[in-house]
Amino acid sequence: MTSQIITLIGVLAGALVSFVATHWAERTRFRQTLATRWDERKLDAYIQYISCIKEEVRTARQAVEASERGDDNTGALTAMETAEARRSVLFEGLILLSNDAAVDAARAVNERTWSLLEWARCPGGEASTRHRELSNLVIEALNSLHGAARQDLAMQHRSRSPGRRQTPAL
C-alpha cells in the first residue's frame, strides 16, 4: 500500500511538473509571437512614415525646380500636399506604436519637413540653395529617427566609418 501511494505521488508530481513546464513554454511562445507581431507593425510604420517623408522632400524639390524654370509647379505642389496628408496619418500610427525617443525624433522630422514644405510653397531667391539646406536638415532628423527606430526595435547598430555621414536617398 505504501509503495502504491509513493507511486501515485510520483505520478502526480510528474504530471504537475509537466503541466507547469508546458504552461510556461506556451506562455513564453505566446509572448514572443505577440512581440514579433508588434515589432513587424512597428517596422512597417517606420518604413511607411520615412518613405512618405522622402516623397514629400522629392515633390518639394520638384516644385522648387519647376518654379525656378518658370514652369507651372501646381502638380508638384498637389503631390506634396497629398503626401503631407498621408504623413499626418502615418505619424499617428507611429505615436501609437513607437517608444518616446522615436516619437520625439519623428516630431523633429515633422518640424523640419514643414519648414521645407513652406519654402517649397513660396520660394524666394536662391531657391535651390535654400531647398538643399532645408533638405539636409530633414536628412539629419531622419538619421536620428533611424537610430531611435533601431533602438526601439532592438536592432544592432551597423558600424560606420567615423565621420561618414549617412544620408538616405531622396
Image (spheres, grey):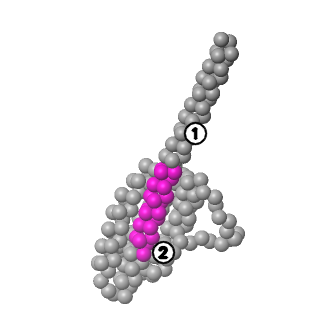
Per the image, the residue denoted by label 2 is 170
Q: Residue 22, percent across and down?
A: 57, 36
Q: Residue 164, percent across and down?
A: 65, 72
Q: Residue at x 65, y 11 (%)?
A: 1
Q: Residue 100, percent across and down?
A: 52, 49
Q: Earlier in the sequence, mark 1 or mark 2?
A: 1
**Considering depth in this image, is 1 or 165 the residue closer to the camera?**
1
Identify the residue at the far top of this view.
1
In the rendered structure, find residue 25 and report the number of the disc placed on it: 1
Q: Residue at x 43, y 80 (%)?
A: 127
Q: Give yes or no for residue 57 being in the magenta stretch.
A: yes
Q: Amino acid at mark 1?
A: Ala
Q: Residue at x 29, y 78 (%)?
A: 74
- State the image quarter where residue 147 is shown: bottom right
Q: Please indicate, yes or no, whether residue 111 appears anywhere in the rendered image.
A: no
Q: Please indicate, yes or no, whether residue 26 appears anywhere in the rendered image.
A: yes
Q: Residue at x 40, y 70 (%)?
A: 56
**Considering depth in this image, is 136 or 147 the residue closer to the camera?**
147
Q: Residue 2, percent across and down?
A: 68, 12
- State the image quarter where residue 26 is shown: top right
The answer to whether mark 1 and mark 2 are in CB contact below 8 A is no
In the rendered structure, find residue 42 and report the number of the disc placed on it: none
Q: Label 1's element?
A: helix
The span picked out in magenta is: 36-58
* Residues packed near mark 1 inside 10 Å, few (<14), some (14 to 19) or many (20 plus): few
Q: Is residue 90 above or below residue 78?
A: above
Q: Determine whether, in the image, residue 153 is placed left or right of residue 68.
A: right
Alpha carbons under labels 1 and 2: distance apart = 46 Å
Q: Determine whether, in the image, residue 72 is placed left or right of residue 36.
A: left
**Considering depth in this image, is 148 or 81 the residue closer to the camera?**
148
- State the image quarter where residue 122 is shown: bottom left
Q: Give yes or no for residue 91 being in the magenta stretch.
A: no
